[in-house]
């Protein structure tokens, strides 16, 4: 639970970006598989960006709680996908 | 518990940073690491923690090799040189580390006004005190402290030294800092890093002999 709370704290910094991307997906192609592929690519890009910048330093916090970088980004991806799919299904009800 | 690190070889591009390292630390004793700028002190702590993967290393706990990064065992906590906490309210951070906020306030009453404050609103020195306290007090067997005395006022340094002397009873503490007098005072054993190798210091004047300190610095 402690680890999940910590990962959610990390996700909080990116939740607004994720929401804007969801809106973009709805406009361009509100297909769930396309959304999953887009989010997977963006998560890999974020991983790369964090690793290549000073943001990498912040990973020590998660490592201190026993969370590896792989685990951090995997959970981040699944939480984001869950929110994205829920968002798309809700939007489809209104379109 | 006994922690040993051995057979370390670390290169950055073609430059050899560490080779011929042996360090032993045990519960109840503080191990201090000294060395000039760029000698590999921070790299060594990162290697022990599992943050850097060198060409070779052997970390052993109670004689048994640890093959995965040490942080995955949850036995270790690491204070890096830079600030590392996410921008959350202080009590939330304490909750994540399972450290008692009220106990912290007893040690550092001046922080009681920050109960609803996010960490980034604090000064660098104040953030440092919070980080050191969390790392020292959270549940672990091994504590790695990289420059814990930097950015801290003398009065707070004394408090931190007291905390270290309490926590060392149940933990292995490995500490490094350029403020060598504090390291000498706090540590039970001292290792000097020079030319990529570690040298256990038995007598303090060896620090002068190895040209870490200038002659007469210790008098």
Image: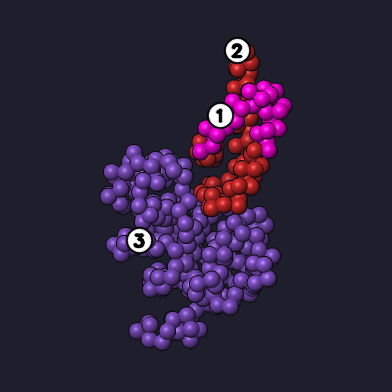
Chain colours: A red, B purple
Q: Is residue B134 above or below residue B213?
A: above
- Looking at the picture, tell me which residue is in the foreground, B205 or B38: B38
Residue occupying the far top of the picture: A94
Which quadrant holds residue B101? top left
Pointer 2 residue: A94
Give the structural element (helix, strand or loop) at label 1: helix
| Residue in view at x 65 percent, y 34 percent | A39
How far is the residue under mark 3 from the one under mark 1? Answer: 41 Å
Pointer 1 residue: A19
Give the structural element (helix, strand or loop) at label 3: loop
- Looking at the picture, tell me which residue is in the foreground, B85 or A35: A35
Name the spot of residue A34 as percent of width and height, x first.
71, 28
Give the structural element (helix, strand or loop) at label 2: helix
How far is the residue under mark 2 from the one under mark 3? Answer: 57 Å
User: Does the segment drawn in magenta span residue A37?
Assistant: yes
Most frequent secondary structure within the magenta stretch: helix
Say whether residue B199 is left or right of residue A29: left
**Nearer the observer, disc 2 or disc 3?**
2
Q: Characterize the local packing of mark 1: few (<14), some (14-19) or many (20 or more) Cα atoms within 10 angstroms.
A: some
**How many numbered marks does the figure carry?**
3
Determine the chain carrying the residue at label 2. Answer: A
| Residue in view at x 63 percent, y 23 percent | A27
Mark 1 vs 2: CB contact within 8 A: no
- The numbered dot on residue B152 is 3
Residue A77 visible (yes or no): yes
């Amino acid at each position: 639970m402690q680890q999940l709370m910590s990962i959610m704290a990390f996700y909080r910094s990116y939740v607004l970006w994720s929401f804007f991307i969801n809106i973009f997906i709805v406009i361009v192609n509100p297909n769930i598989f396309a959304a999953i592929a887009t989010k997977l690519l963006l998560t890999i890009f974020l991983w790369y960006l964090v690793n290549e910048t000073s943001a990498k330093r912040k990973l020590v916090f998660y490592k201190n709680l026993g969370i590896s970088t792989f685990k951090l980004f995997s959970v981040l991806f699944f939480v984001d996908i869950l929110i994205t799919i829920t968002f798309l299904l809700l939007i489809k009800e209104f379109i | 518990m006994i922690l040993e690190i051995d057979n370390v070889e670390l290169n950055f591009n073609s430059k050899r940073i560490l080779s011929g390292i042996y360090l032993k630390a045990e519960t109840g004793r503080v191990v201090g690491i000294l060395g000039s700028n760029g000698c590999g002190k921070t790299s060594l702590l990162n290697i022990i923690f599992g943050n850097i993967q060198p060409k070779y290393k052997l970390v052993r706990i109670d004689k048994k090799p640890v093959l995965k990064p040490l942080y995955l065992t949850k036995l270790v906590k690491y204070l890096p040189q830079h600030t590392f906490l996410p921008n959350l309210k202080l009590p939330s951070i304490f909750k994540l580390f399972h450290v008692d906020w009220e106990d912290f306030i007893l040690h550092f009453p001046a922080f009681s006004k920050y109960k609803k404050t996010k960490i980034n609103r604090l000064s660098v020195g104040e953030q440092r005190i919070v980080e050191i306290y969390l790392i020292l007090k959270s549940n672990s067997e091994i504590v790695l402290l990289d420059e814990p005395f930097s950015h801290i006022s003398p009065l707070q340094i004394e408090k931190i030294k007291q905390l270290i002397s309490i926590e060392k009873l149940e933990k292995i503490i490995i500490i490094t800092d350029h403020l060598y007098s504090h390291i000498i005072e706090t540590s039970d054993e001292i290792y000097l890093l020079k030319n990529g190798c570690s040298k256990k210091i038995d007598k303090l004047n060896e620090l002068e002999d190895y040209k870490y300190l200038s002659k007469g610095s210790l008098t």
